[in-house]
Amino acid sequence: MELLKNKVALITGASRGIGKGIALAFAKNGANIAFTYLSSEEKAKDLEMELAQFGVKAKGYKSDAGDFKASDELVTSVVNEFGTIDILVNNAGITRDTLLMRMSEQQWDEVMNANLKSVFNLTKAVQRPMLKAKKGSIINMSSVVGVKGNAGQSNYAASKAGIIGFSKSIALELGSRNIRCNAIAPGFIETEMTGKLDEKVVQQWRDSIPLKRGGNSDDVANLALFLASDMSAYITGQCVNVCGGMLT
Ligand code: NAP
């Protein structure tokens, strides 16, 4: 089934992890893929080739999603190269975990820029081509931590909660223009981001999840595919948890 045939998707932070899983799922379903990364040059080249094997156009761009001007320039380049942008996935994100007592201003600012300001930057820039096309689907990667909070992650949780409020507001602003905006809140998804954690802590997480396993990037990519496609044509302003029942 080619749910996204001939659509153009821009995915931030797709050199690895969840973003890569989304890029592969979209390409398998016929979408042309523009994706970004920050430093993983080699992985990005490999992904370009992997995506092209599905017979779609694919290009990786080195671009800091937290940089307003760079994001605007990125969208202009993608539109010049691909013709339009039908789907935006704001996936790029980082963690700088520590208790508030030890958190530096830099750790706060880095997380806010990469996780929340990036969503503003890219969404604002893709408004132009989406308004022109009178359609679009914007998907923002939040987290269950943004819904419920987490000790040691106040910067990350605040950025992810901000994404939910932003997504709901954009859904209200742009719904009449046939542009949808939804958020995904993954629970514990096993990627390089979580690979930094102690294996004992990881096992405790797995044990505490009703479905008794961590999620994988496909679990999140399947929801992103649904939200990107016309299968979800009447869904906007929602935040959907993908967490194995961790948060009910
Ligand atoms: P990951 O494996 O660490 O990958 C992060 C990706 O984002 C990489 O491609 C990285 O590029 C890119 N990136 C980071 N900062 C960037 C920036 N400023 N501009 C452009 N790209 C940037 O992370 P992940 O686990 O796949 O997570 C993806 C998203 O899901 C994040 O928003 C994360 O907060 C969210 N999430 C993850 C989990 C989880 O359990 N894994 C749970 C809830 C939510 P480089 O490779 O070049 O560094």
Image (cartoon, rainbow, N blue to C red):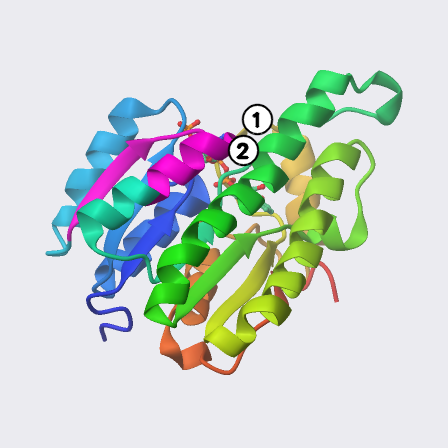
Badge nearest the viewer, 2 or 1: 2
| Picture coordinates of residue 114, whole percent (x, y) | 57, 33
Say if residue 77 shows up in the picture: yes
Give x and y (percent) for residue 72: 41, 39
Label 2 beta carbon within 8 A of ligand 1: yes
Horizontal arrangement in the rendering, residue 101 relative to residue 212 (left or right): right
Q: Is residue 39 left or right of residue 201?
A: left
Helix, strand, or loop for circle 1? loop
- Residue at the spot 60% in from the left edge and 67% down from the top edge: 173
Q: Residues within 10 Å of mark 1 (few under 14, many from 20)?
A: few
Do the residues under discs 2 and 1 have CB atoms within 8 angstroms? yes
Q: Is residue 230 above or below residue 186?
A: below
Residue 45 is situated, as x and y percent measured from the top left of the image, at 21, 31
Q: What is the magenta range?
A: 57-75
Looking at the rendering, which quadrant does residue 229 occupy? bottom left
The answer to whether 168 is drawn above or below residue 196 in the figure is below
Residue at the (72%, 50%) spot, across then down: 161
Q: Residue at x 44, y 53 (%)?
A: 89
Q: Which residue is mark 2?
A: 193
Residue 70 is one of the magenta-drawn residues: yes
Q: Amino acid at mark 1?
A: Lys
- Does residue 125 sit above or below 103 in this rendering? below
Quadrant of the drawing holding the N terminus: bottom left
Q: Amino acid at mark 2?
A: Met
Label 2 element class: helix
Residue 247 in percent (x, y) is at: 73, 61
Q: Residue furthest bottom?
A: 234
**Label 1 sits on residue:** 196
Near-viewer residue (130 or 52): 130
In the image, is the residue at mark 1 within 8 Å of ligand 1 by its beta carbon? Answer: no
